[in-house]
Image (cartoon, rainbow, N blue to C red):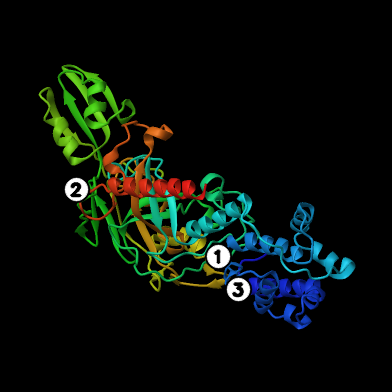
Amino acid sequence: MWLSTWSDWLIFFLIVQVIHFAGTWQLYIKAGRKAWEAAIPVYNAVVMLDIMKRPKWWVILLFLPIISPIMIMVMWVDFIRSYGKRGIGDAILVIVTLGFYIYYLNYVEKPEYTGPEERKETIISALLFAVVLATIVHTYFVQPMIIPTGSMENTMKIGDALFVSKNVYGTRLPNTPVSVPFSDLFSRNLFVEKLQLPYTRIPGWDKVKKNDIVVFNFPTDSIYKPIDRKDNYVKRCVGEPGDVIEMREGVLFVNNEKFEPKKDALLQHSASVQYSTQLSPKFLVETYGLVETDYRVSAFEGGYQYDFYGVTDDMFNQLKALPNAIQSTWIVQPADAPSPNIFPKGEKWNVDNYGPLTIPAKGMTVNVKDIENLVKYIDVIKKYEGKNLELRDGVLQLDGKEVSDYTFEQDYYFMIGDNRHNSLDSRFFGFTPEDHIIGKPIFLWANLNQAFGFEPKSGWQWDRWFTIPNNDNPNKTSYLWIGGILLAVFFGWEFIFKKKKD
């Protein structure tokens, strides 16, 4: 990796300043400025903006990751136009040569300063402004997200379209500052992996707390190494740093107390119900939204057994109250049936009988010579703390030095899906590091499973549009009518303005 620490970036920044000065100082003079003004970091950008007659606050955009490369190219084009190079070919040339076309102008052609051209609003300039503005909002404030899986059913449904606030827990600067805007929405490989910023988070006004629904990067994503390029996951935080997590017969306990979810949480578990006669698939879809992949039917002497993969308490009570129901029970994996994929490796746990497990906290020290602690935390220390912990010649070494204790350098969280038996969560991938936290869903503006073909298709579910998730209120209020009014006002104003302009 070329650039990964702030010292690396400082050296890179100073090199860029030298390159900038060497390629522009004569052009600065031709614009009536001093040569030394091209050499002073930051100030040279302010002077350059003055030469182009652009707003001075643009200099802020030059230091925003992802936005910066766009603004640099815009300024290259604007700068050469101030010296009469206003053709499309010149613009393409300065971008293709990564700005070094300016060297040719500075030392060979030496054009006179003509001042910026008279600027007119064009489709391209309007689109560019829209892209920059949308990228700023998407990267630093609010990120859209559509839920593709049922791990949070029925609290959050497949196809729910969310707005995720990145400021609540503090805005995390992108790890990959040079990338195509919005590439995380359609292709996460459009970035320069060699250029990575160290983890930095602007302080927010809240901390991740138990019962928060949290959006985070999938910690064990094996495809992409940069944190901000890993898959986005949404789960419920059930454990904070230092908490002790335990599942007993399918019941979650935190610090030895039964975990109480928020009132608007609709937890789902697997259940088995026996009936004297078969149930109609149409009835199950229309009444409970259960498609044929949501359950399994098996015949036995005297009836049929339905194993449902995820139902809420209310759904279970209704299913077992049907007239042809014989007997019913929740499905719980026995304690003596360990899962091979459980975290941490080596523990004989499963999704219903798990722990106890202490969540690492920043500043917490554990004895890593204790084999139980080593099994639980070695992956965390190596993968997320970036330490080389290994047993060499019978001696436990940390970065080449003998060690018996380890102190964690960041906080971790335990995330579980509300669909307890159909969720890839911390019981499988382990703790979620603080540097993987993206934000908190603050607004559910639509459910789009009908539009995108998600299953089960259950209509447009208008009652979910324009609602507030995770607010501890089971009776959701839809503000769709407000959205309709705003759209009517917007398009009405556009129509009136256009008629008036015509």
Any mark on residue 435, and which? none
Instruction: Say whether marks 3 and 2 touch (CB < 8 Å).
Output: no
- Give coordinates of residue 211: x percent, y percent: 27, 57
- The residue positioned 43% from the left and 34% from the top of the image is 452
**Spatial CA span between label 2 and label 1:** 50 Å
Q: Earlier in the sequence, mark 1 or mark 3?
A: 3
Of the residues tagged 1 and 3, which is closer to the observer? 3
Q: Quadrant of residue 412?
A: bottom left
Of the residues tagged 2 and 1, which is closer to the observer? 2
To which residue does mark 3 refer? 56
- The residue positioned 80% from the left and 65% from the top of the image is 102
Which residue is at the front of the view, 486 or 281?
486
Q: Is residue 274 above or below residue 219?
A: above
In the rendered structure, which amino acid carries the disc numbered 2? Asn
Considering the numbered disc 2 on the image, is that residue within a helix, a strand or a loop? loop
- Give coordinates of residue 343: x percent, y percent: 39, 51
Q: Is residue 500 above or below residue 137?
A: above
In the rendered structure, which amino acid carries the disc numbered 1? Asn
Instruction: Mark yes or no: residue 303 visible.
Output: yes
Instruction: Mark yes or no: residue 425 visible.
Output: no
Q: Is residue 62 above or below residue 121?
A: below
Drawn side of residue 86 relative to residue 433, left or right: right
- Give coordinates of residue 8: x percent, y percent: 65, 71
In the rendered structure, which amino acid carries the disc numbered 3? Lys
Of the residues tagged 3 and 2, which is closer to the observer? 3
Any mark on residue 475, and which? 2
To which residue does mark 1 refer? 388
- Give coordinates of residue 230: x percent, y percent: 51, 52
